[in-house]
């Protein structure tokens, strides 16, 4: 199946991964050279920027907006630096500890604080210089720092929402935690505490307090299929340790006492983040349910499957017949499990790039961005509502005429 990546270093990974049937075709995070034109509307938010404008016009820079969440709650967010002093950083050995940035997203009470930015200022500048050009987006043609979220930065938690089930989110290989915001905001607006995690030195850029930006470490000079498989396995293992560490810190974060319901925990991941979601659901008894957004499986979970409720959400071209890891995972899994296929979707449809760069069809497919967002939000929230809140749904039992884009794969 087609797959691309954020930077040239990851484009090389994706290209070589496709050259072998034993490689993992959809774990590198998506990006591609843009072509064609578009100006779309998603969830009521205007998506500005035809590809011709992005490629040719030096000014003014295009500004991009995200669709508003549809849940009953206003939302807030907080960014936090976490330090795991129990381990050296596995990617930069000179670092005596592992350092992460995470964001909390939650139902919020009244606040006059400004909306949080989608990307922090220095991270947005680095994205513009290093990441966007690999997708065919000319440097300076998009004002990435101008995009805001719908969450008030530092807003107080809405205590009337009660104890909040927790969902952890992990992006695709090389991707920042910000690119899951469209789905994350929806969950927060529907009564969840969502924790998004940046995987330092693998993500293209991670901004820490004070404006320090840490970039991804260089890849090996020779990227053979076996090297790529080993690299993805290493990244998956590091991410797994990161997520376990974050999960263990939730009861120690100031302001979360009495807010987070740590007896109800889900995990959501895109691409390699989806594989890590499955592995954590397999390994960690604290995790109750998981969702994989179009990621092939890396590591033992491809053979063992899971026994907890699990949803795998596929782009149109991603099938068990074409991805042996999906087939082995499915056959080994037990209990509640479902597979959905989204017509017209590509690998990048499961990221914010679906609405930010709708003209890049190799990246986000042909599905209408507004429909893609609506369908994903409906099914992901229904899944977690079912398994973390006990709310019944028939959405996964029979085809629903409200969502003709979805195929329930038996």
Image (cartoon, helix red, strand yellow):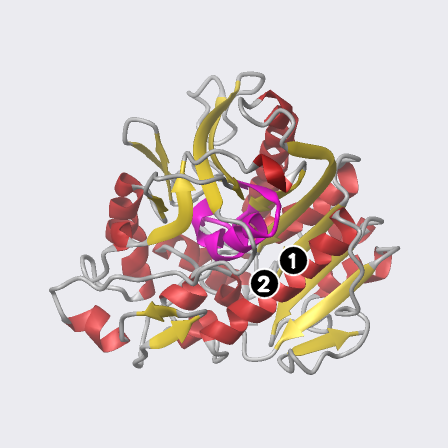
**Image x and y of residue 147, in percent:** 31, 54
Q: Residue at x 72, y 58 (%)?
A: 383
In the figure, is residue 396 to the left or right of 2? right
CB atoms at circles 2 and 1 under 8 Å apart? yes
Residue at the farthest left position: 59
Residue range highlighted in magenta = 170-196
Q: Which mark is residue 381?
A: 1
Residue 91 coordinates in the image, percent (x, y): 48, 32
Question: Residue 370: x percent and y percent?
Answer: 47, 73
Judging depth in this view, the residue of 133 and 345 nearest the camera is: 345
Quarter-of-image position of residue 279: top right
Q: Is residue 24 above or below residue 97?
A: below
Q: Which residue is rendered at x = 78% and y = 57% of the image?
A: 329
Q: Position of residue 349 (x, y in %)?
A: 50, 67
Which residue occupies the foreground of this view, 188 or 346? Answer: 188
Quarter of the picture containing the N terminus is bottom right
Density class for disc 2 (Cα within 10 Å; few <14, some 14-19, many ≥20) is many
- Res. 71 in view: yes
Q: Is residue 2 visible?
A: no
Residue 17 vertical position relative to residue 342 in the rendered view, above or below: above
Tag 2's secondary structure? helix
Viewer-proximal residue among 120 and 198? 120
Q: Which residue occupies 27% across, 59% down? A: 133
Residue 375 vertical position relative to residue 249 in the rendered view, above or below: below
Q: CA distance from mark 2 to mark 1?
A: 6 Å
Q: In this orientation, which residue lies closer to the viewer: 153 or 301? A: 153
Q: Does residue 27 belong to the magenta stretch?
A: no
Quarter of the figure with the C terminus? bottom right
Crowd class of label 1 (few under 14; some 14 to 19; many from 20; radius 10 Å): some
Q: Which mark is residue 313?
A: none
Numbered disc 1: secondary structure: helix
**Residue topped by disc 2:** 377
């Amino acid at each position: 199946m087609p797959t691309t990546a954020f930077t040239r270093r990851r484009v090389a990974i994706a290209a070589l991964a496709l050259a072998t049937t034993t490689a993992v075709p959809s774990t590198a995070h998506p990006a591609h050279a843009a072509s064609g034109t578009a100006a779309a509307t998603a969830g009521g938010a205007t998506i500005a920027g035809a590809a011709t404008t992005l490629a040719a016009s030096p000014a003014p820079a295009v500004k991009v907006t995200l669709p508003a969440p549809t849940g009953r709650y206003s939302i807030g967010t907080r960014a936090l630096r976490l330090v795991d002093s129990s381990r050296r950083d596995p990617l930069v050995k000179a670092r005596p500890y592992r350092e992460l940035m995470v964001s909390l997203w939650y139902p919020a009470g009244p606040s006059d604080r400004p909306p949080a930015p989608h990307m922090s200022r220095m991270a947005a500048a680095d994205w513009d210089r290093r990441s966007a050009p690999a997708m065919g987006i000319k440097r300076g043609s998009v004002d990435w720092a101008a995009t805001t979220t719908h969450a008030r930065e530092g807003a107080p938690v809405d205590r009337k929402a009660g104890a909040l089930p927790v969902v952890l989110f992990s992006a695709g290989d090389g991707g920042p935690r910000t690119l899951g915001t469209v789905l994350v905001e929806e969950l927060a607006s529907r009564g969840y505490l969502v924790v998004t995690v940046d995987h330092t030195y693998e993500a293209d850029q991670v901004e820490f307090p004070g404006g320090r930006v840490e970039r991804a470490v260089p890849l090996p000079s020779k990227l053979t299929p076996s090297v790529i498989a080993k690299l993805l396995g290493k990244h998956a293992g590091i991410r797994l340790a990161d997520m376990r560490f974050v999960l263990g810190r939730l009861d120690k974060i100031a302001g979360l006492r009495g807010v987070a319901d740590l007896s109800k925990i889900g995990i959501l991941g895109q691409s390699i983040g989806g594989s890590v979601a499955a592995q954590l659901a397999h390994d960690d008894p604290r995790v109750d349910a998981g969702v994989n957004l179009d990621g092939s499986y890396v590591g033992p979970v491809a053979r063992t499957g899971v026994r907890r409720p699990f949803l795998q959400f596929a782009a149109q071209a991603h099938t068990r017949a074409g991805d042996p890891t999906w087939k082995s995972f499915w056959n080994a899994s037990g209990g509640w499990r479902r597979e959905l296929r989204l017509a017209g979707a590509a690998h990048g449809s499961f990221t914010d790039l679906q609405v930010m760069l709708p003209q890049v069809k190799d990246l986000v497919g042909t599905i209408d961005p507004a429909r893609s967002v609506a369908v994903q939000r409906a099914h992901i929230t229904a899944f977690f509502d079912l398994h973390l809140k006990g709310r019944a749904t028939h959405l996964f039992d029979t085809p629903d005429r409200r969502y003709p884009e979805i195929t329930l794969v038996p």
